Image (tube, rainbow, N blue to C red):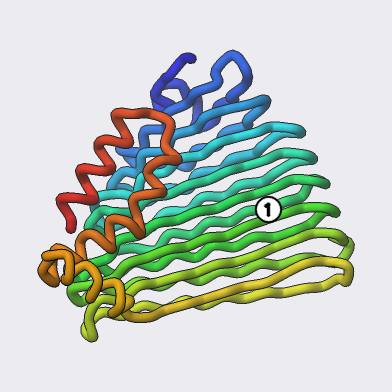
Amino acid sequence: MRRFELNKHLRNGHADIDDNHPYCRIDLSTPAIDKSLTIRGISNLFVECGPNPFSLYLLLNKGACVKLQIIAPNKPTDWMLNVALDEGATLQATMVDFASFGGVVTINGELFGQGSRLDWHLASLTRNDDVKKYIVNFSHKAKDTTAHMRNFGVIEDKGHLTFTGKSHILQGAIRSSTHQTARIMVFDANSVGKANPFLAIDDNDVSASHAATVGKINEEHMFYLKTRGLNDDEARRLITYGYLAPSIKEFSDRKIRDRLTTQLQVRL
């Protein structure tokens, strides 16, 4: 499979991905410009967020199937991802955020093609006075569309983390399904976690749900680990690692998986 730096491939911030270029690496470390991609066929897309604000636009053509993998920036910044899915298109998106930064990240998913599907999974570690806000919006505009939103976070050491999820099934989007899950584990009283789920349903014959949990670490888990000889810090690190590390497996490149594992271990 061919890999290339998107910022070198783009002309005026636009490019196409098709079966001739099934793997794309987007380098967003360059000065901020809006970038857009039209994707055809089956693609594996890796996004490296840089220190500059930016907007990224993805259009999945009819029947496109994309595995999107995103790494959060290492410096404070705001950025936006807009995704539009045509008929039968599928997007499986995973973002890991183990970095020390603050900012607002906005994800907009528009399912305008019948039978399109969007799966979003975020794993975030917030500590050392980090202030992070994630806003994820799904809009169902066609029949038989499906969207799943899963946001998981761990907060400690005066960190602030907010998940806001908005799912909207519009009139006429019958037989559509939208579901949200937000879980935040808070380690200390000086940290703040908020989960704000919203559902807007404009038609019948649909399925919609949300589940949001913000709470302290399970004391029984801590007690069990300490009976096995671990102290408080070791038990905390092990629980946090087990909570966030599974998202790393979604990344296709072994070197990137190793890098993310090291980053998580260092921040713990």
Whether residue 216 is situated above or below residue 1 in the rendered picture: below
Whether residue 18 is situated above or below residue 265 in the rendered picture: above
The answer to whether residue 63 of the structure is visible from this angle is: yes
How far from the left and from the top, in percent, is residue 3? 43, 19
How far from the left and from the top, in percent, is residue 130? 24, 67
Which amino acid type is marked by label 1? Glu
Q: Which residue is mark 1?
A: 110
Name, please, the residue furthest toward the bottom. 189
* Location of residue 140 (image quadrant): bottom right
* Left or right: 166 in relation to 217: right
How far from the left and from the top, in percent, is residue 118? 64, 49
* Location of residue 205 (image quadrant): bottom right
Q: Nearer the viewer, residue 235 or 129?
A: 235
Residue for point 27% across, 65% down: 126
The answer to whether residue 30 of the structure is visible from this angle is: no
Whether residue 103 is situated above or below residue 116 in the rendered picture: below
* Left or right: 114 in relation to 151: right
Whether residue 37 is situated above or below residue 155 in the rendered picture: above
Residue for point 77% across, 50% down: 112
How far from the left and from the top, in percent, is residue 203? 86, 71
